[in-house]
Amino acid sequence: MTTTPASPAPHLLAPLRRPAFRRLWPGLVASRLGDHFTTIALLWFVLQLTGSGAALGVIVLCFALPGLVTGPPLGRLLDRYQPRLVMGLDNLARGLVIAAIPALAFAGILRLWQIAALALLAGALAPASQVGARIVVPQLVPDDELERANALAAVSMQLSYLVGPALAGLVVVAVGGPWALLIDAASFLVMAALVFTLPDVPRAAPVERRWDRGNELGFRPLFHVKEVRIVTLLSLVFFLAYGPLEPALPLYSRETLGAGAAGYGLLWSAFGAGMLAGLLLTTRLVGHGRPGVAFAAIAVLWGLLLAPLAVLTQLGPALLCFALAGAAWAPYSTVELSLLQRRIPAEIRGAVFGARATLTGGVVAFGPVLGGVLLDHLAAPAVIGLSALACVITGLGGLLSPTLRAVRHQHADDRAGAPPQNDRKAGRIAAPCGRVGHGAAIPRHGDR
């Protein structure tokens, strides 16, 4: 029997050859850049308006908390209706919400409670596009390009973090906070215009599953599908283990490195640069026949590269270690997201990703709180060391899991005997009725 040689892995930029994904990607870049304008401009504007640090905390919470509640129902909405319509309407609505803040300011009637109410509304709508991007990306590219497409989506986030805050700060200084907020409102309109042009997502006939009966919010299949359950649990523990690093890092920069705020900023810049470079590793990880092993190994490597910060006392070596840790972290979300997109049946992806966003969002919020408690009793280097150790243990636990080690690149619908959704010969996406498509901080509310 002859063996067919494996086809070469697609280039990292291969998804940009698909017209539909090529329309989505600039929308993600513009939208995420716009988020930083809201982050910088709105918080600075609130500080000028009130002079209160507590008011800043209230606004951040108003953006972050509603999505923990609205994620599951919005996910169900995405399963029921075409994601491009839900995402487009979401971006139009949030554009109007953000634009209302400078409009009220120009009218001279803006008050803090109005900002808080508008922030609550924007935060409540945000999961529609966060989850929507996770649904549409697998439909816009062939399956063998899925990791590259998710990596490019992550690149758009990293580019926004490297460029957005500095650019937003310059705009705020030059023209003021209200005008900067209008730039974010415009970015929502750009995103809406682009997602409205995306092809419809194919809708297969519903598959009756005993474990999905009576489930409206996606939590039951999230923990019933074995691979999805273990990946989710591992991520929850990993994010919790990572969390104490965030409050410990500024203290580490000030008290251990003696570098103050400038050193703190440089540490995160080094992390961002390392993460952007590390996304190139995704190309090699895609060829790994056991993505579950790669997924857990990333957690181990992150912890090992973070651990030296517990003993380093000079800024230069700390920057190097943090940059390398960022490179190690970079492929994590791509490997994890691609694995989940293949394992979750297409007709319930919205509900499951919405439920998962609620769980991970809660853990991401609790991790830094845990770090703050630890810092009351331990020095910052010790807290960083404990965080690194916990991440290593989490990854090793994943490597010991037979279920995770056995995960292969296989689609849930393929296992069920359903026809593949991607027409690989044509390089296009099959759609209903013969339609053919043209072959997703402070506050981190804008993962649209």
Image (cartoon, helix red, strand yellow):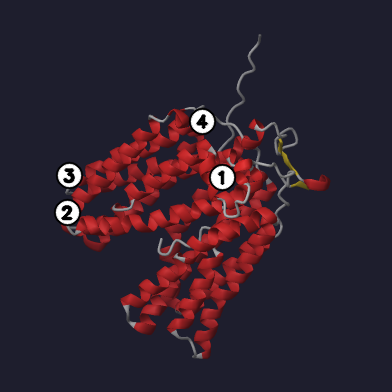
Disc 2, SS:
loop
Residue 123 position in % (x across, y down): 51, 67
Q: Which residue appears at 56% of the width and 75% of the height? A: 97
What separation in Å lies between label 1 and label 4 (alpha carbons)? Answer: 18 Å
What separation in Å lies between label 4 and label 3 (alpha carbons)? Answer: 37 Å
Q: Are marks 4 and 3 in contact (CB under 8 Å)?
A: no
Task: Read off the residue under disc 3.
Answer: 311
Q: Which image quarter holds the C terminus?
A: bottom right
Task: Read off the residue under disc 4.
Answer: 407
Disc 3, SS:
loop
Task: Read off the residue under disc 1.
Answer: 221
Residue 378: numbered disc: 2
| Above-or-below relation of 180 to 76 | below
Q: Name the quadrant containing residue 5.
A: top right
Mark 3 or mark 1, which is nearer the start of the sequence? 1
Q: Are marks 1 and 3 in contact (CB under 8 Å)?
A: no
Q: Name the quadrant containing residue 305.
A: top left
Q: Which residue appears at 56% of the width and 71% of the height? A: 185
Horizontal side of residue 47 vs 286, given as left or right: left
Of tags 1 and 4, which is closer to the observer? 1
